[in-house]
Amino acid sequence: MKKYFLLLFLLPVFANAQEILTLENAIGIALEKSYDIKVAKLQQEVADVQVFRGNAGMMPRVDLNANMGTAFNEVNQKLSNGIETNRFGKSYTPTSNVSMAWTLYDGKRMYATLDRLKGQSQLSQLQTRQMMENTVVNVMQAYYEVMRQKQTVAFLQTVIKYYEERLTITDQRWQFGKGSKLDYLQSKTELNTQVTQLVQAKNALKNAKISLNNLLVRQPNLDFDVQELVGIMFDSNTEDLKSQSRTANKNLQFLKKATDISVIVQKEVAALKLPRVTLNSSFGYSLNKSNAGLFLYNQNVGLNIGLAATWNIFNGEITRRQIQVSKINTEIFRKQEEDLWVQIESDIVRAYNQYQTDKELLKLEIENNEVADENLKISLEKFKLGGSTILELNEAQRSLNTSLNRLTNARYNIKISELIIMRLSGELVK
């Protein structure tokens, strides 16, 4: 019986238990279930599959060919020896062969093609990492938003306790004739305002969780709780961040690889100006059988081998113009790479300055909150004893409200600043 009552007592605890979703788990779930990442990985697989020597033209091509032909003709022949043939003739000519064509030399175009295929595969891998990085950024932003809304709900619940205590005091004063009904009504209005804000904050918290569940490909109404993340994650200087971004920034890596591929394309096009040597070979069988004509039966089985060389001398300057276009495209990629790096440098300096500012603001807001909280407690005690007016208490409560709100935003802002720096430096996905 005691066990039964104990179980009933613990049931509400189990009913209210929530999943504690850590940031690491959220990122892991998103990377595993995101449809965008799955599509990017399939596209990467397509690019990887195309990297082989045969696709670059380095391997021979072997074909099995077969043909069956027949003919029906009215044959009228007269030979020099006086023999004449006048009949309805029929013939059939089956043929088959195995042929091979193997490019031995094409100005090293095939090697450039293989390098381009490898580069496109690596470019696809970078696109997958970019997609993963975008997913991680979206998840972290959504997670921090849930954290901010949770803190907003918590500080409003804390503030409401003070407003409820104030309402109780003004009510008692009014009932015993020591205070005015106006103070009571004002306290009631202020409390209702805070309760309204709490209702709105709880709804915002639910919507923030729905957004995060959407990124994690989970049911929208799946409830969970998040961890409070306030600590500073790193303290690098701008030069270290620039050096790291130079090699790890995903957008910069993508443009660098695109530039490398464009250089390889130049080699492919330039190879068209050089000769092409091909080894051709075939092993075949042919038969020609007829009931009229000079040869009634002709059969051949044999092997043929030969070399073919082709060198384009002039094609209307098409190759020369293609080379010019490929060089221009390479220069475009290089300019875009230089422009992106200038932009990244500026973004790093701005993000670092904002990060340092957010750290200072967070420290100040923590101190301000402690002062505002102590000030309200003192003002409330003085109000209980009749040593202060309701206006002074109002000011103390508003100061605490403002302080808690700014503290919540300061905690959120510093996490966003960290996130921006980590993305610029390429730390999110390696």
Image: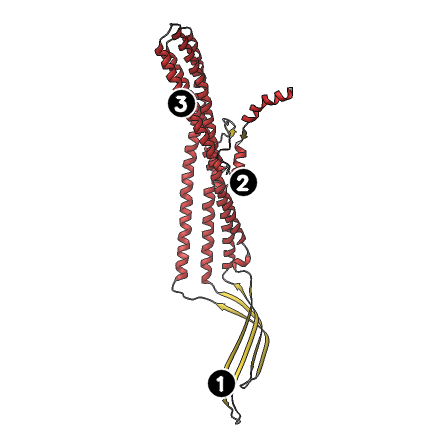
Residue 106 at least partly seen: yes
Of the image marks 2 and 3, the number of the one nearer the N terminus: 2
Of the image marks 1 and 2, the number of the one nearer the N terminus: 2
The one of 301 and 259 positioned closer to us in this rendering: 301
Dot 1: element: strand
Give me the C-alpha separation between circle 2 and circle 3: 39 Å
Give me the C-alpha separation between circle 1 and circle 2: 76 Å
**In the rendering, at what x and y percent does residue 419 appear?**
47, 33
**In the rendering, at what x and y percent does residue 55 appear?**
52, 58
When the figure is inspected, residue 11 is found, relative to residue 349, above or below; the finding is above
Q: Amino acid at mark 2?
A: Glu
Foreground: disc 2 or disc 3:
3
**In the rendering, at what x and y percent does residue 11 appear?**
58, 24
**Image quarter for residue 315?**
bottom left
Q: Amino acid at mark 1?
A: Glu
What is the number of the mark on residue 196?
Answer: 3
The one of 340 and 250 positioned closer to us in this rendering: 250
Foreground: disc 1 or disc 2:
1
Image quarter of the N terminus: top right
When the figure is inspected, residue 385 is found, relative to residue 243, above or below; the finding is above
* Residue annotated with mark 1: 74
> How many numbered badges does the structure rendering display?
3
**Image quarter for residue 163?**
top left
Q: Amino acid at mark 3?
A: Thr
For image coordinates 57% across by 26% down, the residue present is: 14
Residue 413 at least partly seen: no
Hey, which residue is sitting farthest bottom in the picture? 82
* Residue annotated with mark 2: 32
